Image: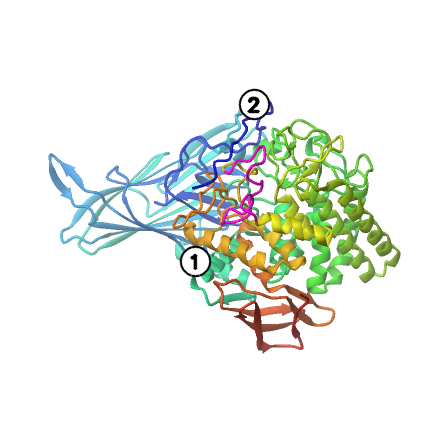
Amino acid sequence: MPSKTAVQVFPSETPEGPFYITATQAAGRPRRTLKDGDTFAVLDSNGDIVATSGGPGGLYYQDTRYLSRLELLINDKRPLLLGSNVRDDNSALFVDLTNPDFILDQRVLLEKDTVHVLRTMFLWHDTAYQRFAARNYGEQPIELRLSIAFENDFADLFEVRGLHRERRGTATAKLRGDDQILLNYHGLDARVRHTTLTFDPPPDRLSTSVAVYDLRLAPGEMRPIFLAVGCDQMQSRPMPFLRGLIAARRGMRGATRDRTSVQTSNDLFNEILCRSAADLAMLMTDTPQGRYPYAGIPWFSTTFGRDGLITALQMLWWSPDIARGVLHRLAAYQAKTTDPLADAQPGKILHEMRGGEMAALREVPFGLYYGSVDSTPLFVLLAGLYAERTGDIGTIAALWPAIESALAWIDGPGDPDRDGFIEYQRATEQGLANQGWKDSHDAVFHADGRLAEGYIALAEVQGYVYAAKRMAACLARRLGRDADALKLDAQAGRLAERFEAAFWCPEIETYALALDGAKNPCRVRTSNAGQVLFTGIAATDRAARVAAGLMQPRFFSGWGIRTVARGEARYNPISYHNGSIWPHDNALIALGLARYEQKPLIETLFEGLFGAATYMDLRRLPELFCGFERQRGCGPTLYPVACLPQAWASATPFTLLEASLGLEFDPFHGEIRLRNPRLPAFLDRVILRNLQLGQSSVDLRVRRRNDTVSLDTARNSGHIRVSIVLTR
């Protein structure tokens, strides 16, 4: 049984804040998600859109819901679900449905399982395409009524999340011919949004809320019905269904062509990797600056600075081109002026951007919002890691002004009291109260449960700054700026010394979660200390103690490492940030364990997250799950409003593999190294195909040999040297 540790209850003197994601009802049928560009759909397992109060169902475009209901009915009844499957590459959803029994005066007029409806849906170029293929498997001709009910509220995403608005724009609906409906919304931001529904063939009856087809099907006969729902596409007719489906699949394949692939001896892990790769491909979005991983569906399908940077970092070893797009996009939106409502200061890197009505009206501050203390050092860090991975100094030279501006913010406005630590405090009450990755209002607290106040310096963010300056020093040398390199290295060294003195807490044998505005340490055992290891700022002996503590039962649930250790004041395994398990957090911790040569601990962590993923729907790791202790024969407990998929969670299996193998790349000398490689017990063999270094590529085959591995090169297209480095 899980431990029954007493949990102290604190009065809600601090409200959740205006941007809390509400959970007002029990979860219904499993949801299915599709995405293309700035459009995504959240459907139930029937393929319907049913926007219940507080639920995420809908077709969305640029942070606005463009369809809030799309429901298929047979003779005014919901069909029975036979199966619901997303293609392995996420390009389409297939739903198999059948009719229920239709009874009149105690007589069965139509037996169940007589009519099969195959429902196919995909997104392409801001349009949702559907085909309803109805087939009669009975021995007699049948007549039935197939209805497609629809409506829309044009709700801003923040309204869907639970925010109330005093005023809204006006909505209208009108027929266009015998096959189209046009839903319009005249927003308070002076923008007109349109949803266009096009039916083929024209329905027998069409109104502004339902399309009705009266079907007569001979035995074995199939009748297709097509529907295209366009988001702001009122000037053009939709592409034919099959042509669009082919184009969507080609686009998906083209986006992932020539990427490194991974195959292992474990079929379940292969499924997890395939799902993760497909989810990352779906979340990738073409922007003017390059491809960018949108953070997650449904709440975060847009550009997020921190999420994009960490996801690109996780993908560096097998898809380094993503980092280039992320860096260019965030450099393009780097803050140039001070704007308190947006928490913007010159040099800061974006937290998030939004395209909805509420953002345009500044009812929420997230049009371009910079309330993230860690995005700026992570930007510099990713730039350095990208150069180490690719040798692409041309890109770094182009980005250097943005890197310098980011460093100036770190040393200037980012450290308002000039104590050498980067800190945050929101500029207005509309901003996020906490501005690290754990941004819940109660995520930063003292050992007695009191919330930290004033300017807050997070432990892992100091590590990000340390690593960023080390990387910036390397970049400066590559660009011939030796004096800058010496200065940055010296700053990093002094920061490491100050960090050890201020953050180490011997009584709990780990680093403090944070320093509050009075420089008092938050002496709480949290996973933040694990991310400190990832950055390399920790002293070696203390890193070993932190690593050992993270794998103790108070932290490690059997599935993963909790954000807050069991027994701490605000520990809650079903909370967002105070006891739950975040896959990406565990992935960065795994990289930290690898840095400090704690490979056996990585194996335990890897096995836990692998085990959790095997229980997940579609083998998809969610944004987070609950921190309850692992029980034999039972899966992990899900978190009700977690994003599925979430980019950095999807990248986690690849990061765990990177940490286990100890992958290192040296493009300047044409070498790939595996440092102290090990594989967990569930993997006997790993094959990496098309692993790229510069213009060359190699196929590697790694086999587990007890506590080490054997390695052979199956293909080498250039002159890449591959080696194993053993330092323990």
Residue 688 higher or lower than 14, as above or below: below
> Is 566 within the magenta?
yes
Q: Position of residue 721 (x, y in %)?
A: 67, 75
What's the residue at 69%, 71% (across, down)? 671
Rendered-image quadrant of the N terminus: top left
Residue 336 higher or lower than 559, as above or below: above
Q: Position of residue 399 (x, y in %)?
A: 75, 54
Whichever of labels 2 and 1 marks the residue nearer the N terminus, that label is 2
What's the residue at 72%, 50% (across, down)? 538
Mark 1: amino acid: Asp
Within-10-Å neighbours for mark 2: few <14, some 14–19, many 20+:
few
Number of labels in the image equals 2
Q: Tell me the tag on residue 11.
A: 2
| Residue 594, image quadrant | bottom right
Within-10-Å neighbours for mark 1: few <14, some 14–19, many 20+:
some
Task: Please state which of the two labelled residues, at mark 2 or mark 1, is closer to the viewer.
Answer: 2
Which residue occupies the foreground of this view, 120 or 576? 576
Secondary structure of the residue carrying tag 1 is loop
Secondary structure of the residue carrying tag 2 is loop
Q: Position of residue 480 (x, y in %)?
A: 85, 61
Question: Seen in the image, is 149 located left or right of residue 453?
Answer: left
Rendered-image quadrant of the C terminus: bottom right
Residue 117 higher or lower than 692, as above or below: above
The residue where tag 1 is placed is: 88
Mark 2: amino acid: Pro
Q: Position of residue 727 (x, y in %)?
A: 68, 67
